Image (cartoon, rainbow, N blue to C red):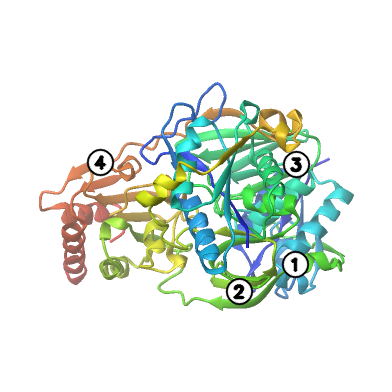
Amino acid sequence: MAELIWVYAEVVEGKITPTTLEILSKAAEVGTAEAILLGPAPDDAVKTLGDYGAGKIYRSPDPVFHDCLTLPAIKTIAGLIEKHHPELMLFASSYAGRDLAAALSVVLDSGAITDVGDFVLKDGRVEASIPALGGSYLNTTTLAGSGTKILLVRPKSFEPKARPQTASVEDVEAPSDPSVRKARVTDRVAVEQEGPDLEGARVIVAGGRGLREAEKFSLLRQLADLLGGAVAATRAVVDAGWVPYSLQVGQTGKTVKPDLYIACGISGAVQHLSGMKGSKTIIAINKDPEAPIFQVADLGVVGDVFKVVPQLIDDLKKRKGA
Amino acid sequence: MNIVVCAKVIPASSVTIEIDPNTKCMVRKGVAHELDPAAASALEEGLRLVEKQGGEVTVVTMGINEVTTGIRNALAMGANRAVHILDDALAGSDTLATARALAAAIKKESFDLVLCAAESSDSYSGIVPGQLAQLLGIAPLTFAKEITVEGKKITIKRQSESGYDVVEAELPALVAVASGINEPRYPQLKGIMAAKKKEIKQCKAADLGLKPEQVGSAGAREKVLSIGRPPVRQAGKIVTDEGEGGKQIADFLVELKVI
């Protein structure tokens, strides 16, 4: 019998996240996939999860799961795991996913594997591939012990694949214990997004510290517009407050795999490489010939960003005009 | 208010981190270490809170002898004292074994707030804060971009996919700070001098009531089976800009059929 694999279905901004569907697809491919869906969710959530391979969904629409961070979900999921003993419990490497995996690894005394890029499951034993230290190593890791194994999976590790079926739904109760209300979300503030969506962009033009000041990002926006792409940034640049966090690519921030990634003034810290190394083609412009970014670049130009990029923009404009 | 800051000390940023093929752990012995900049941000938040409200900041860390430089740095920044969990038996700890040791040390302190980095800058697993909060039985306020404390109530702005959430809880609580929350101070000469007189309390796993099978590689659930290198990306073409760099990129884009 196929092994039982559970996936935590995450809802962000009223939608099942793409990473949930990626992980669910993988789970359905290697075992019997079931999903846990807690808190308010869109009307078609159950159908969507079924479409991507969930045979069964444990469901509670109780708002407590939305209002008290991960605390109620920890209790509910731990209870379900103790009852049904799935082989694997999979989470996305997201804010909620990390906190849930962390707490459950304590409750179940199971430990957890983070940053999983791929995994195999054989006779109750899991072997996960972890791109460590920004992808300079590829480690194989397992979890000792006989209980449910917890894995945190990196976004974009698997292709979402539809395999339509109708999922059965089992209602679960929300915990009433007051201890799950220790933390309360009192407000949600959306920061305005600029430009096209990073995760779906085919072309990304990204900037790092080498741009020296926030205003210089307009140069990258011009280039991105010409290529029909989106603008991204490194953590250092986001931390400096030059651009919003929504543009951050890296270990923290978004994982992207565009057809083309143009890195401008980016040295290529481990933090950043983890989030963009999977890009199909990488072009890097940096004044330091030793910058690690050149090790992953298909074309590297050692030079001044403020000379190379304007020339590129002019050239593209000419070609477009011609 | 009394604050415990979990401060990881990591191989210095100038060091290329290697993995030892035998132990399958990062090579730390004999390597220059420094206070993780992410931990320095957590400490900075702690120092600002006690400067406003009074109280003490205790730094708790776990690591080999080499991490002492980082602890001194934390004390020089202004932490009042430090606890250093130093024990060869801790080698090979995974996140859970690490969190267990830190939690055991924190429980020996009186605290209203535990601060740590959302993730370390060497291993980036990002789950030790959540494990710690669970072990200590306090609210996990993770990915904080801003912290406010009023009496017994703590409020944070928590990074979200689309912006931030405002989250509140009662103390004691754990807050994991997101990178960029502040610009940590540099230790001043006075602080460096004062740090020499501050106490670094060393303790072993047994002092914290931990059994040998709970810590180090014996206590780790996570086992690295093999370390390898990913398939090598085919080496690209590297050119030096001699006035034609932008055009060369444009040519390449034509080749790629992007334009």
Nearer the observer, disc 3 or disc 4? 3
Question: Which residue lies at the image location 48% right of the left edge and 27% below the top edge?
Answer: B29
In the rendered image, the vertical position of residue A235 relative to residue A151, given as above or below = below
- Residue A68 or residue A37, whichever sits in front: A68
Q: CA distance from mark 3 to mark 1?
A: 24 Å
Horizontal side of A77 relative to A209 (left or right) equals right
Q: Amino acid at mark 3?
A: Ser
Quickly name the residue at label 4: B237
Q: Amino acid at mark 4?
A: Lys
Q: CA distance from mark 4 to mark 2?
A: 48 Å
In the rendered image, the vertical position of residue A111 relative to residue A250, given as above or below = above
Quickly name the residue at label 3: A110
Q: Amino acid at mark 1?
A: Lys
Image quarter of residue A162: bottom right
Question: Which residue lies at the image location 46% right of the left edge and 45% below the top edge?
Answer: B195
Horizontal side of A108 relative to B64 (left or right) equals right
In the rendered image, the vertical position of residue B157 relative to residue A96, given as above or below = below
Q: Are marks 3 and 1 on the same chain?
A: yes
Q: Amino acid at mark 2?
A: Val
- Residue B17 or residue B4, whichever sits in front: B4
Horizontal and vertical percent for residue A282? 34, 49
Q: Is residue B159 visible?
A: no
Output the chain of dot 4: B
Quickly name the residue at label 1: A182
Horizontal and vertical percent for residue A152? 64, 49
Circle 4: element type: strand
Quickly name the residue at label 2: B166
Q: Are marks 4 and 2 on the same chain?
A: yes
